[in-house]
Structure formats: structure tokens, C-alpha cells
Image (cartoon, coloured by chain):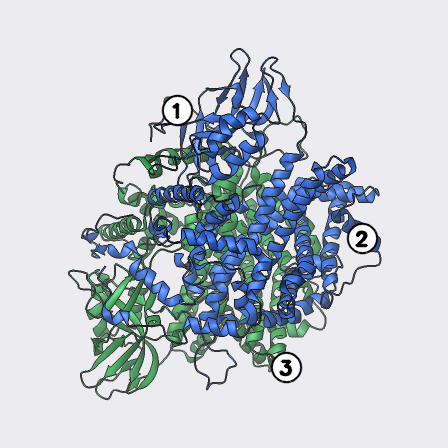
Chain colours: A green, B blue
């Protein structure tokens, strides 16, 4: 387009400037940003962030400016270049795994190496025999083998047992034949498969002598190591554009009777004896459960910071954006009101700010429990080991429910943040939309969020039956069920307005009440499983909300928090965030709370009309410093609206004016003429 | 990529095929699809759809296959070509305005002509004097002038009075000077402005002799009529990529003291007398209110079919997708269960199916009321005229609330439909994601959905105060407030489980209760306006839900419906949809209903545990025929998952395999090499 005229260059936004407004916000709060950041992230992580960012930011290959204008072919090609450069830097600077994950997090873009660096390597590390580690893992770690994890099929998602791909053992030549018997057997959605991988871990039904032994992992070469063309009888490609994740080559894969040697069945747990053709059973499946628990706990932990990212952007922009005057303002007052001063905006954003802390602390606690439990299970002491197994069952179930709740709250919360930014929220430069679209798969993968709630319900039903027979395990779930049974006849009447411990107890009471209601329907009324799915979903949500509330409460009340903050104002603001999260959740789930008798209807009404509005008032002055404490670098946010310096309008204008290939086009606007008057120069993208 | 091997071409999906499953669904329901379609759309509209579709579908320019893989420059250039072809076809086939809108609806893509063909022409038609019609409107209708409507600014959205752009009257040369005093004064988000328009209707503060008369519309030429380059002292361009709407050139626009002649102020209502420099006031603003009411009623009407589109896709796909066996199924049963049989899936989709009918009938009723009212106001009879004005105030307020509710339900409902499709919902070929992203601006424009609720609350407060003083108007709003006051002391106790009229009454009761609660807080407790914004939002939602329930009830009970359907099974299924919509809404808003005493807690519990599940059971067998009745052509849906013929997997595979430019790339996967092994041929896009 035409060069920017000089008269445009002199223009500045109408005052007060964003920078002034954010400075005022920061001046009037006493939240200890650095200490709170340390509590959220630890010193080590903050140091890592700075160190890795300093290496990445100057590299031109990581430039984010034109991403959202590119075609898919341009985007994915650029993204592979970024992935390669990340790998090079990782080698050059001898990055640890944590450094490497931090780098990917700062880049905030799925790359074609993504599944190689995660699921593929993890699977090989866990499921290879020592011989296979040499053969596959070492070559994969040096990026000679580039792989993916091929489980899902075109017609088969959550139900792994329904997979169609077969691996048929041939005792005569000691091989497996991998085959796709139909179109729906095509592997589908497999990250890094479409254009990048030369190998795949393929989940296939193991067939020995006509008998199906269920899905097992096999490593299969799919492309030539030199030409990168698909091997004969392999049909592979990218599945096409998606709502987000367009820098990843999610792929499809079909096999036509491909033979692989015996060593290609990943055999650390299960195997086929080549001499006898006998299937060798796994000794202990709990390690597999452990990994799933770890993956889901990570999604819960991420959910907190994912949400915090959207909240950071929306809170900063709503402190800068000004619209209308307060309806009650004296008519002599001029100037518009900061949008963040409106109660309706506070009611949309600040509970999400609170939820981001709640999910983060919950995810942290889940990871700790996981580590403690892994340690327990590794001891030789038998009673510790059994305790570990019992805890693992609890951890597994709770991580399912928390994954479902956490990713739903984060995903839907990002969209609330986007809308709270008004029209500009819709611009890609808000930094929320593209991030939201890339995040959404979390609600579906690693167990669809609705599907998972059945696992939680199944576990709670089992626990409740045990408690009813006085055979409850020594864990928190059985404890809250036991407590409910004991107090049930007296009733609850928790004082959620004045007593924080009572808030936790009220959430426990409601979860326990819904559990026993479900037991009654299933075991006494003999209702079908299918007819109870909606109840189970509600039950799982209630139980997971209880866990989040409990973990948040324990985190804000802990001695570690007290010693890190060592500062009463910040600690008491954290307590307010806890109360806001809890009471906001309570009033939005009011029906359960009054039906269960956990709380009186009067308390619910007071929570809605008095307590929540008062908490919004109390948190409002600290909101900018609270989001500052999450310490998202501007480079990571890639948001005009969420800039730390508040220069929102200058940045939006600069990007529109300078970073927009559409402005190179000169249309011929008349309907009977050709489309373009001037053909733009070939794009440099 | 490599050609498809012959062994792949022989593959079909694992049975039963989608086509068989949909046929079974259609066979087992007696819904009269064609009669119901006629009730939804009218015969005339259905005929129009077929006629226009037959013209468009063979035109290669409208091909949708590669849209989601293109860069923004490619997409927007293609979209202008589509817009031009639509205009040509419109001339060639002498399309009416309704035909033309139908064509755009079938195309389902915003084009760069979009704002010219709507807001620009509408504004000129409404606000031009006869002289101006000749000068501007006629040339705009022949596409010599291509225009846009430039109101919103970079720093100013909803608050029109805060606009910064000025139009200063110069009595010496009888001109206005249009000027942008700061960067935030830049017009922003203006559709069709970025690359296409050569003129703009600019909303600017009219300044006469140093006094500000508020925002008024001026027509300003911005680009050269031949070269299409911006005129001197005009800076204009596209604002960049967005979450959706990327085929539209939303633009920015800055003026440096541009002079325009007196005739360029659109002067049908307000004007400046060139002789005296006196401002001439508008006689009657109600026509402007009328237009806004019409625009918002249209959004409500659209919301129904927008949602129905997502529901059509999700329902069809969930009848074809099979996952797991029913938990209680005998172990001898083989094969997986249709996802639509799961209660959790029904509970997510079927209430949205019901809501699509509810919103559609409500929108239709709003349009009728608007037309009746316009007729009333045009009569010379004074009492009819006054009745019209009173009705208009009611219509205006209710259309605000319904716009907010309807577009929120539709927008959020589309995302629920997308997620209900599992992993494949995330593919662009689901047809939901891109459509959802293009729809989302409806939640923000024409009044942000949260902002609008204040207008509803203000009107309800005013009505309640009038009723309290026995000065209520003769309209429905005052009637329900009056009824509530009369029965308040007796209590309500409506039987929502067995009596449809009581359902409507319960929703009216709750809305009235919340209105008087708000009056008490504002007038008695003297609470600040700001502190009540959340209450106002809840109140507006409650009142709008009442209107939807009432309109849906009246539609299903009307004699027109009975005579069109003339068939009891379909009519009774419609009644079930009404009940499902009402009781689902009631149980999800339970707190309001029990607090207001509209319904006992026992009825709410029964609605949740018995009535809603039973309605889901009753509607389930008819769900495919119910979505068929919306009659979306496959070409419009552009969805592999929502195809009428059920060939989901074949189509997903074909698109991945044949319509995917990414598969032309050959990556070099090794981190130390270049990115591409083979450079693809230059894209033909």
C-alpha cells in the first residue's frame, strides 16, 4: 500500500494513554508481584524463562508477525523451520528437557516435531526392551528416526478396543503383518504424521493364530530415509485444515499388508514368544495408569496458566479501554470510565482470574501426589506398595475428573476473555483467538471431557459401596463419603460466608450427596447406566470442583505460601481469590447446594447479592498486579491488547498498517471488471 | 503427493454404512418433513432456495473446496471475485433483494461487497434527500459508487457519543471539513473499507460555530474512481487477520482536514441551513429506532437457523458415529452403539434442536410485530399512532434482550455442536468451526450482548414503576408485571410438568419477580446503577427467555401451525420440543425459579430427573427428520459430517486426499537440513 503519510506519523491516541492507566493501576496496589510470581512458578522456572527467551527472541525464524495471514502450506513450512531451529538451539545450548519445553511454550505454536518430541519418544522410552532402545530410541533421540504415535483411526476415537488395524503374527517367518482392512481403519489425526515422520508407533490389534489379543504398539517405518517418499503399500498424508493447530501436520495412514520383523513389536510389557508363538502377558499395568495420570495432571496444571494468559490480556485491556460514563456519575464529570470498573466486566473476568490460580495450585498438588505415589510404589515395603496402588486408583480417577473440569474451564474461559475485549477481541492481534483455537483440542483428546466423567462416577460409586459396607479405603474420597453418612441426619448448615473451612466442607458435602444419590439410582432403583450419564457428569463435576476448592484452600493456607509471601497484604488477597472462586462456583451451581442441604437458600442468596460483589470490589484494585504476577513475556502473548506497557492502540495500528499483506492488493472494485488492478509482488512468505 | 494407490481406491468404511444408518433413522419416524419445512420457511422461500442454488452451484467461482487452506490475500481476492459474480448473476436473472440475500446465505461467506450491499445502501435509502438520492444512491445502486458505513473508531465502539472524528461547518465556503484529531479517531473494523470502497458514510461530530451537535452521517469519497488509490489526506487500509470474517476487508480510515461540499451531509432528518448556518433538528427519531429493532429482530430470526445448521451437522454425524457398547448391553451383543443413543449426547444436542425452533418462531413473531407496528404508525389515526409509539418502545426493548439472548445461545450452541462431533468436529470439514468463527461477531456488534441488557432493564424498571403507580401501558410487559402484583401474596405454584400454559406463566412470574427485586434495589435501597449490572443482565435474560417460551408456545399452538401440519404426530413432536426447551431452560436456571417461588423445588427436581429425560427419549427417534426439515442443502453446509447421504468417512478421506495443498509439500525431516526436499509447484490458488 501507499507509504504512511507524514501527518499520520504524528498522531497519538487520545489521552489518557494506556501506559499512564496501567501505571496508576500498578501504583495503587501493594501486591508483591515478584514474590507472588515465585510462589506461582518457583525461582528456577522464572530464571529459565528469562534465559531461554533471551536466546529465542533475537532469532528471525521465530518472528510471529505474519503467521495469521499465511496459507496453510506457508505456515506449516515455516513451523518446521522453527522446530528445526529449536532443536539446533537445544543442542547448542545443551538445553534440559525442561528448557526445551519452556522454549516451545514461549513459541506458543504446535510444530511438526511436536509429537516426535513428546508421545513418540515417551512411548519408546517406556515400552522398548533394551535391544529396542538401541535399535529405535537412540536413533529417535538423534532425530534420525522421526516418529509419531498412531492410535486414533478415522472411524475410531475414544474406544481403543474398537481399532481396526491388525498386526498378524506369522510364525513361519517370525513377522507381523500390519494391515488396514477398511477405509475407517485409516489412522487419522496423528500429529507429525502427515508430512514429517518417517516412522510411526502403530496401535494395532495383535492377532495370533486367529485370536485377537487386543491393541498393542508396533514400530513401523513409513517413509524412505532418503527421499522421504512413502514406502510401497503405505498411503500417508496430511488430513487438511482445522479450527486451529494448522502448523501441525495431523495425518492419515493406511497399510496394505506391510511386513515388519518380530523386534518391531514394542515388548517391554507384552510380547510374542517367537519360538512358541505364545502371547506373554503384562506383569503390572499400573505403570501405564501412572503415565495417563501424569499426562492428565499436566493438563490440569496447564489449564491454570492457559486461562491466566487470556485473563492477563483481558484485564490489561479492560483497564485501558474506556467506554461511557458511569450512569450515576455527576454530569459535570467528563471522560469515559475504564471498562474494568463496570461490575458486569468484573463479574466476567475476575472469577476467571481466581480460577486460574485455583487450577494451577490444584495441578501442582496433583503432580506432587503423583510423585509421592510413584515413590511409594517403588519401595520394596509391601504395605507401602499396597497403599500406593490404592492411592493410584484414587489419583487416576480424580485426574480424569480434573482434566475434564480444568480444560473446560480454561477453554471456555478464554472465549469469555476474548468477548470481554469487545470488538478488538475478535482481531487475531488480541492474541486470544488463535491461542484459544490451538487450545481447544485439550477438551477432546486424552479422554473426551464428557466421556471421562463416567470413569470418575464409576470410581465414586465403587467407593460409596465400599463405605456403605464399612470397607472404605484410607483416602480422601472415602473420608468425605464417610463424613457425609455420619452427619447426614443432623444436616449440614455450613457457614460459607464467614468460614473458609466450611466452604470446603460444603463442596465435599454436595459431592458426597450426589454420589449416594447416584448409588441409589443405580443400585436400588436399578436404572440403566445410559439413563444416568447426565447425573454422572454432574457428579464428576461436583467432585472435581470440590477437589479444586480443597487444593486452592490448602495452597493459600499453607506454610510454604506464608513463608514465600511473608507479606500480609498479598496473602490476604490470595485468600480473597479463594473465596471468590468458591462462592462464584457455589452461586452458579446453586441448585445442587440447596437440594443437598449443604447450604441454606438464604446463604446462597447472600453469596450472590453481597459476598461476591464485595469480593469483586476488594480484588479490583489489585487485578493488574495479580495478572503481572503470572509474568507472561510480551513476546509470548503476541497481543496488542495485553501488552505490559499498555500501548494498545499504537500497536494495533502499527500491525494493521505495516504487517498486513492484504494491503499490498489493489482491488478493482467494479463488478464488471477483473478483480485486481495491480497484481501484488509475489509474496515473500 | 503420490497418486492414490489402487488398493486404497477399493477400500470402503467398516459397516454399517452412514447411508444405511440415516435411512433407518428416516424410516422409523413419521415426522412430515416437507410440511414442517413449509411451516419453518414457507413454500415461497423453499422454492427460492432451489432456484438460486441451481444457478450458483455449477459456477466454478463459488467452489468452496480450498478456502480453509488459503492465505488471507488469496481468500479475500477469491471472495471479491465471488461477490462480483453474484452481482452479475443478480442482474442477469433479475434477482429480487430476497433472492440476492438467499444467494449470499447459500454462499455462506462474507464478501468484500457485504457492507456496500447492506448498511451503505440502507443508510443512503433512509437518510438521503431526493437530491442526494440522485447524486449518491443511484450511483451506489449501479455499483459506480462502492461504499461502506464508517462509525466505529479504534478507541470508540459502543459509545457513539464518544466518537472523535469531526465534521466542522465552514460558512464561508459552505463546506464541512472531516478530520481525525488523533490515532484513536481512526475509523476501525469498517467492513468493505479496507480494499474495496471508494466512498464511505462517515459518522462524525457535527461542529457549527464551535458547538458540538453530536454524531451525524456524511458521505465522503476516499479513493480515486479510476486508479482506486486513496485520495490525498486520506489514509486507509485493511486492519489485518481476525478470528473469522477473513474474506471481508474490515478497514481503518484517517482524514487530514478533508473538505466536502454541503450536499454530502445526509440530510433527510437533520441538516445545516447553508444560508444561516443553523442546525435543523430531526422531527421524529422513532424511524431510527424502528430500523434498529428490525436489524435486531433479524439477528434473532437468523439465530434460529444458524443454530439449526450446527444441530443438523451434529445430529446427523452422531447418528452415524458409533463408539463403545452400551454399558448394560449383554456381552453377546457385538458392534458399537450410535453416539446419538447416549443420554449425555442427547442432553447436549436435542435441547439445542428445540432452541433452534424456539428462536426461529420468536424471530418470526418479532418481524410480524414490527410490520404491524410500522403499519400502525403510518396511519393518520392519532390513537393508533400513539399505540404504535407505545408498542415500539416495548418492541425496541424486547428486541435488544432477544438479540443478546438469541445470538449467545446460537454462538455458544454451535461450539457445543462442534464438540459433540468429537475429534472430527475440529476439522474444518466439519463445517461448524469456520461458520462459528464467522458468526461470533453477532455477539458483539449491533450492541454488545452484555451492554444491551442494560437497555432491557431500564425499560423493565420504567414499566414496573408505571405499574406500581397504576399507569401501566396496554402491552404484554405491563400485563405480566400487573399479574404478578395481584397474585404475589397468594404465591404461584405453577404446574410446569403437566400444563403447558403454566410453563409460560412460570417464566413470566420469574421475570416479573426479578423486575420488582431490581426496582427495590434501585429505588428503595438506592443501590448504584453499576452495582446492579449483574442483576440487570440476569433480569434481561429471564425476560427474554420468557418471550422465547411464550412465542414458541403460541407458534406450536397456533391454528396456522395446525393447518400447515394437518397431521397430529408432527404437531405433537413440536409440542415436545417446546416442553424440552422450556424445562431444560428451567432446570438450568433453577435458582431463580425457586427463589421467586414460581415453581416448587420438587417440580424442579422432577423436571431434571424425569421430565427432561423422558422428552429426550420421545424426541430421539425423530431427530434426523427434524433436522432434515430445516432443508439445508449440502452445498451450503459444506460439511463432511453433516451430509444428507451420510457418507461421512468417504468424504473426509476424499477431502484429505484430494483437496489439500499441504500434501504437495515434501519435507526434509532432519533438523540439520533445509526444510523442503521438493519445492512444490507454485500454488494455483
Label 2 – label 1 distance at C-alpha: 62 Å
Toward the viewer: B570 or B446? B570
Residue B394: x %, y % from top left: 70, 43
Q: Which mark is residue A524?
A: 3
Label 3 – label 2 distance at C-alpha: 44 Å
User: Disc 1: which chain?
Assistant: B
For this view, does B250 lie left or right of residue B161? left
User: Disc 3: which chain?
Assistant: A
Q: Which mark is residue B265?
A: none
Image quadrant holding the N terminus of chain B, namely: bottom left
At 23% from the left and 51% from the top, the residue drawn is: A88
Q: Quadrant of residue B661?
A: bottom left
At 68% from the left and 52% from the top, the residue drawn is: B547
Tell me if I can see residue B606 in this picture: yes
Q: Is B414 placed above or below A24 here? A: below
Instruction: Name the front one of labels 3 and 2.
Output: 2
State the residue lying farthest toward the left.
A226
Instruction: Name the front one of labels 3 and 1.
Output: 1
User: Disc 2: which chain?
Assistant: B
Query: Is the same chain shared between marks 2 and 1?
Result: yes
Q: Secondary structure at mark 3?
A: helix
Q: Secondary structure at mark 1?
A: loop
For this view, does A335 lie left or right of residue A605? left
| Residue at image mark 2 | B483
Q: How many marks?
A: 3
Tell me if I can see residue B451 in this picture: no
Proximity of marks 3 and 1: CB atoms separated by less than 8 Å: no
| Residue at image mark 1 | B231
Q: Residues within 10 Å of mark 1 (few under 14, many from 20)?
A: some
Residue A550: x %, y % from top left: 56, 61
Q: Secondary structure at mark 2?
A: helix
Amino acid at each position: 500500500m501507499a507509504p504512511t503519510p507524514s501527518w499520520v506519523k504524528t498522531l497519538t491516541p487520545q489521552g489518557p494513554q494506556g501506559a499512564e492507566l496501567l501505571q496508576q493501576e500498578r501504583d495503587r496496589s501493594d501486591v508483591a508481584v515478584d514474590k507472588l510470581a515465585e510462589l506461582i512458578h518457583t525461582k528456577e522456572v522464572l530464571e529459565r524463562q528469562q534465559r531461554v527467551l533471551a536466546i529465542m527472541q533475537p532469532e528471525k525464524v521465530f518472528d510471529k508477525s505474519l503467521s495469521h495471514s499465511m496459507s496453510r502450506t506457508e505456515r506449516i513450512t515455516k513451523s518446521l523451520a522453527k522446530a528445526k531451529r529449536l532443536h539446533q538451539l537445544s543442542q547448542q545450548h545443551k538445553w534440559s528437557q525442561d528448557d526445551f519445553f519452556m522454549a516451545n511454550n514461549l513459541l506458543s505454536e504446535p510444530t511438526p516435531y511436536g509429537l516426535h518430541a513428546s508421545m513418540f519418544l515417551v512411548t519408546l522410552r517406556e515400552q522398548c526392551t533394551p535391544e529396542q532402545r538401541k535399535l529405535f530410541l537412540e536413533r529417535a533421540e538423534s532425530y534420525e528416526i522421526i516418529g509419531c504415535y498412531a492410535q486414533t483411526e478415522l472411524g475410531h476415537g475414544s474406544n481403543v478396543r474398537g481399532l481396526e488395524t491388525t498386526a498378524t503374527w506369522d510364525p513361519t517367518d517370525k513377522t507381523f503383518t500390519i494391515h488396514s482392512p477398511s477405509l475407517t481403519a485409516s489412522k487419522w489425526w496423528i500429529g507429525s504424521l502427515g508430512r514429517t515422520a518417517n516412522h510411526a508407533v502403530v496401535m494395532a490389534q495383535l492377532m495370533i493364530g486367529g485370536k485377537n489379543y487386543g491393541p498393542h504398539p508396533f514400530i513401523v517405518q513409513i517413509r524412505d530415509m532418503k527421499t522421504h517418499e512413502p514406502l510401497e503399500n503405505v498411503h500417508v498424508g496430511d488430513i487438511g485444515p482445522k479450527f486451529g493447530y494448522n502448523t501441525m501436520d495431523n495425518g492419515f495412514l493406511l497399510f496394505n499388508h506391510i511386513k515388519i520383523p518380530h523386534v518391531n513389536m514394542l515388548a517391554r510389557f507384552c510380547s510374542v514368544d517367537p519360538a512358541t508363538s505364545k502371547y506373554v502377558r503384562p506383569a503390572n499395568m499400573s505403570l501405564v495408569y501412572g503415565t495417563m495420570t501424569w499426562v492428565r495432571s499436566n493438563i490440569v496444571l496447564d489449564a491454570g496458566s492457559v486461562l491466566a494468559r487470556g485473563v492477563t490480556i483481558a484485564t490489561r485491556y479492560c483497564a485501558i479501554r474506556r467506554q461511557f460514563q458511569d450512569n450515576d456519575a455527576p454530569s459535570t464529570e467528563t471522560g469515559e470510565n475504564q471498562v474494568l470498573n463496570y461490575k458486569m466486566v468484573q463479574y466476567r473476568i475476575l472469577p476467571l482470574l481466581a480460577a486460574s490460580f485455583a487450577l494451577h495450585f490444584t495441578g501442582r498438588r496433583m503432580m506432587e501426589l503423583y510423585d509421592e505415589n510413584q515413590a511409594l510404589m517403588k519401595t520394596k515395603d509391601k504395605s507401602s506398595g499396597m497403599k500406593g496402588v490404592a492411592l493410584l486408583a484414587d489419583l487416576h480417577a480424580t485426574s480424569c475428573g480434573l482434566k475434564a473440569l480444568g480444560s473446560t474451564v480454561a477453554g471456555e474461559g478464554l472465549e469469555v476473555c476474548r468477548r470481554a475485549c469487545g470488538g478488538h477481541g475478535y482481531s487475531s492481534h488480541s492474541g486470544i483467538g488463535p491461542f484459544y483455537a490451538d487450545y481447544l483440542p485439550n477438551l477432546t483428546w486424552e479422554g473426551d471431557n464428557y466421556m471421562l466423567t463416567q470413569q470418575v462416577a464409576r470410581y465414586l460409586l465403587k467407593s460409596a459401596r465400599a463405605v456403605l459396607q464399612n470397607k472404605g479405603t484410607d483416602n480422601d474420597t472415602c473420608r468425605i463419603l464417610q463424613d457425609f453418612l455420619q452427619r447426614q441426619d443432623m444436616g449440614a448448615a455450613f457457614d460459607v460466608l464467614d468460614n473458609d473451612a466450611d466452604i470446603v466442607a460444603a463442596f465435599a458435602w454436595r459431592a458426597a450427596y450426589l454420589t449416594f444419590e447416584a448409588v441409589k439410582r443405580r443400585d436400588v432403583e436399578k436404572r440403566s447406566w445410559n439413563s444416568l450419564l447426565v447425573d454422572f457428569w454432574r457428579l464428576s463435576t461436583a467432585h472435581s470442583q470440590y477437589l479444586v476448592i480443597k487444593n486452592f484452600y490448602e495452597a493459600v493456607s499453607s506454610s510454604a505460601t506464608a513463608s514465600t509471601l511473608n507479606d500480609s497484604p498479598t496473602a490476604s488477597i490470595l485468600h480473597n481469590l479463594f473465596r471468590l472462586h468458591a462462592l462464584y462456583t457455589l452461586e452458579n451451581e446453586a441448585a445442587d447446594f440447596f437440594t443437598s442441604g449443604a447450604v441454606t437458600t438464604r446463604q446462597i442468596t447472600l453469596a450472590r447479592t453481597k459476598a461476591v460483589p464485595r469480593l469483586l470490589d476488594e480484588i479490583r484494585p489489585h487485578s493488574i498486579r495479580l495478572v503481572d504476577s503470572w509474568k507472561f513475556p510480551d513476546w509470548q502473548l503476541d497481543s496488542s491488547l495485553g501488552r505490559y506497557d499498555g500501548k494498545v492502540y499504537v500497536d494495533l495500528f502499527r500491525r494493521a498498517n505495516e504487517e498486513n499483506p492484504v494491503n499490498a492488493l489493489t482491488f478493482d472494485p467494479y463488478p464488471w471488471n477483473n478483480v485486481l488492478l495491480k497484481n501484488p509482488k509475489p509474496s515473500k512468505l
